[in-house]
Amino acid sequence: MIPFKTFLIEKAYELDAQENKQVEETFRAYERYFGNLDGEDPRKRFKSVIKNDRMLINTIKYFDHETKEENYIPVYVSFVNFAADASYEQKENVIELYYKHFDKLTDLVKRNKIVHELLHAKQHYKKLDPAYRRAVQKRSGAKTTIRSERGYFFSPNEYPVQLASLVHEMDRQYMLILSNLKKGSNYKFWDNQRREFLRLLDQFIRSPKMVEDGNLPNYLKNEKRFLMTLFRNKDNSKYAKYYRDFKKKLYFYFQRLQAADKKKLDSSEELA
């Protein structure tokens, strides 16, 4: 089985094994510090290590495709009152997890937010175009940091990272299923999970209105705003290319999984 991330031709938009390991270490560090506070204010518990309203929880070694060199990026938990849940700050080269919003996310989303921001640090194209800058200018009185979803999601530095972080989570979940199948215990359960994964992916490719209905697989639910922006602009002459690109990659992925399943079935029949 060829991982989904191989669709992303540029290495800038995938994590290697060591980077994935460090993402997991960062997620676990966050849970170790903040997972059992029982209502206690973390700023009081960790007062001695909080500097400038933020706390360092890990440092990730990664390959920066802009400089073509290995680099290190600190991951901070920030306690400032900001509307986002996480961000990559290019000028300072740090990842910030904004406690107020980040802590409310599910474990799946927390992990993927770290992946998303690390991909921003790795990517070769970091320039913020004017449309992106306008898109993230908060309206007066607004509760979101995104002013224009098209300007944000379709910008050259954001679209490939949105796609890469989404496919990363799909790949992670499918690989987890395969790993459990290989172990042999609860084989029927995990084989049903595999079949359901494929069924829902096929259904999503054939029925894009699943986005509007909200009946999405769990690996897509957390990307609904991105998916809705793609879907709403699928007939727009300027933006339809993003929708076509996304659907093409999903279909290609589905074909590869079908081929892998057929190979597995043929091997089983030869052994019978």
Image (cartoon, rainbow, N blue to C red):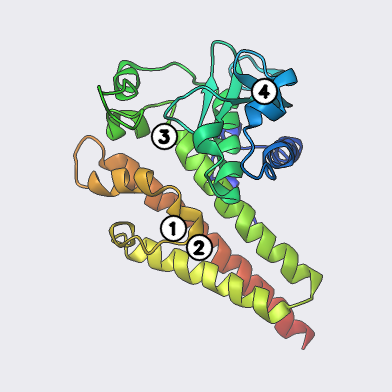
Instruction: Give the image location of residue 111, x and y in percent.
Output: 61, 43
Cα separation between marks 4 and 1: 42 Å
Identify whether 146 is placed above or below 38: above
Q: Residue 37: image x %, image y %?
A: 67, 41
Percent across and percent down for residue 32 are 74, 40
Q: Earlier in the sequence, mark 3 or mark 4?
A: 4
Residue bearing mark 3: 159
According to the picture, the residue beneath numbered tag 2 turns out to be 255
Q: Residues within 10 Å of mark 4 (few under 14, many from 20)?
A: many
Q: Residue at x 68, y 44 (%)?
A: 35
Q: Disc 1 or 3, which lies upstream in sequence?
A: 3
Residue 201 vertical placement versus 124 (above, below): below
Please determine whether, in this image, residue 207 is positioned above or below residue 15.
Answer: below
Q: Which residue is mark 1?
A: 251
Between the residue at mark 3 and the residue at mark 4, the CA separation in whole angstroms equals 29 Å
Give the residue drawn at x 53%, y 67%.
197
Q: Amino acid at mark 1?
A: Tyr
Identify the residue shown where x is 62% and y is 60%.
Answer: 174
SS at badge 3: helix
Residue occupying the far bottom of the picture = 272
Q: Amino acid at mark 4?
A: Met
Residue 254 showing in the rendered view? yes
Can residue 1 be spotted in the picture? no
Name the residue beneath numbered marker 4: 55
Query: Alpha-carbon distance for marks 2 and 1?
Result: 6 Å
User: How many marks overall?
Assistant: 4
For the residues labelled 4 and 1, say whether their Cβ atoms are less than 8 Å apart. Answer: no
Amino acid type at circle 2 is Gln
Query: Looking at the image, do the residues carrying marks 2 and 1 touch, with CB atoms under 8 Å apart?
Result: yes
Q: Residue, x 75% and y 83% (percent of image)?
A: 270
Q: CA distance from mark 1 to mark 3?
A: 18 Å
Helix, strand or loop under label 1: helix
